[in-house]
Image: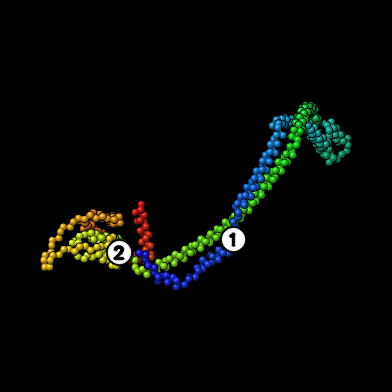
Amino acid sequence: MAPKKDTKKEEKKKEAPKAPMNPELKALLEKEKALPKVPQPDRKDFDAFVEKVGEEITKLQEKQKGIQEQIAARSTGGEAFKKDRDEIRAKLDEYQEQIDTLRGTKDKLHGDIKANKDDAKSKGNELKEMKKKLGFDDLAGVDQEIKRIEQAMHYSSITIKEEKEYLKKISVLKKLKPQLAKISGQSVSVDEGAITDAKAGISDVKTQLDSLFEAKKIQSEALKKLQETRKKQTEGNQDFYDAKEAVNVQIREKIAKRNAQRDEFNKLNKEYNDSEWAKRQLRNDRGRIERDIRQAEWAQRQAEEKDEAGPAAAPFTTELVELDNTIKYLKTLLPQEVVTKEEVTVEEAAGILVQKKDRDDEFFFAPTKGPRSAKGKKGGKKAAPAAPKAKAIVHTMESLIIFDKYKVSPPANSTAVPDCLEALAKQVVNYTKKQAEKVAELERKAALSSEDKKAEEEAAAPAAEEVAA
């Protein structure tokens, strides 16, 4: 039977005024509306453009390849030409190196001749300067001057002062004689032998240079002739080179155009992605706020429903109700003579507040009245009860699951029912004890402050980790 609708709740929802929009949510919606619309660039158009330009570049490259093949066809013999040209250039370099060496030798010989002459000239100037300083060219001049002074002293009337001066001059002249004797025997002249040898070496170098110049001239003419021959063979290739370069320019222009289009597309695509990202961020924020609002409304509804529903059922209520229903079901399987008095229900024994009108709905099977016990005639004695006949019991899958849950063997026939009832009664006592302990624990925790609860949870966490390990 479907549950009846709570008309009072629906009336409250209709009567409740619409709550004002959250300010933060309203601001986000306005910000989202204010975002500029950025269109997404067309990828198909861009790909078509790139493909078209790529085809044009491929055609130009094929054209360039054809021109290069024509150049290669007209440039046969290029390897032989390069080989001969390199050999001639190597010989020219060799000749030039020898020429430079001989020129250095010639310059050195000229330098030796010049140095010899300069040395002789320098020594002659030094000798002249020394003679000029002494005042005499040879010893005879010194002796003649001494003789002149002595005659003047002997045959002239002189004072003592003049005599002392004459004696001083004679002494000086006599001291000059050794120096003058030393330089008078010297003669300064150029080393003609060295100069002659140097000139001979210069002449030999000139002869070698002339030979090398002639050989170099021959090789230069051979190189010139080789280049002219090659030029005639490759005449007209410049037009092909120019055509190749023109095609290369077109290829570069196409590539630059494609790159510019790609940059523009990437720029527009980035602007679009940035816009979508901003919208997504705003939507995420809006979703978060809406979730918070819904969560708050749900929490409020839960609180209201909790207040309306009253206190929650005690722990292990479900288990005790299942045990009670099972016991009731098994009692219906007992012979009527066994059930002789009214027994206390499991709910009453366990202190479960379950309305009596709802208890019958929990039975596995609706109980039926058993046959009354036979009575004797008025005033007569009761007949002796007959021994109950064992009757096989067929259990449903649901009842078997219940028996397995509480670790009780299901009775195979009616004679096994009392033992099964006894086992179920023990389970009732066990779960009643668990219920009382759990209720006491919940009441203790409810009385704790938030700090005490947090400290208790932190203390219990390591123990839980050890158990898990």
Mark 2 = which residue? Answer: 361
Identify the residue at horizontal 81%, vertical 33% (top origin).
121
Identify the residue at horizontal 40%, vertical 70% (top origin).
7
Q: Is residue 151 left or right of residue 333?
A: right
Q: Position of residue 204 (x, y in %)?
A: 78, 26
Q: Amino acid at mark 1?
A: Lys
Return the residue nearer the eye: 229 or 272. 272
Return the residue nearer the eye: 126 or 330. 330
Q: Position of residue 468 (x, y in %)?
A: 35, 53
Identify the residue at horizontal 57%, vertical 56% (top origin).
273
Q: Quadrant of residue 421?
A: bottom left
Q: Amino acid at mark 2?
A: Asp
Mark 1 = which residue? Answer: 37
Looking at the rendered image, the quarter that the N terminus falls into is bottom left
Disc 2: CA contacts within 10 A as few (<14), some (14-19) or many (>=20): few
Q: Is residue 407 left or right of residue 385?
A: right
Secondary structure of the residue carrying tag 2 is helix
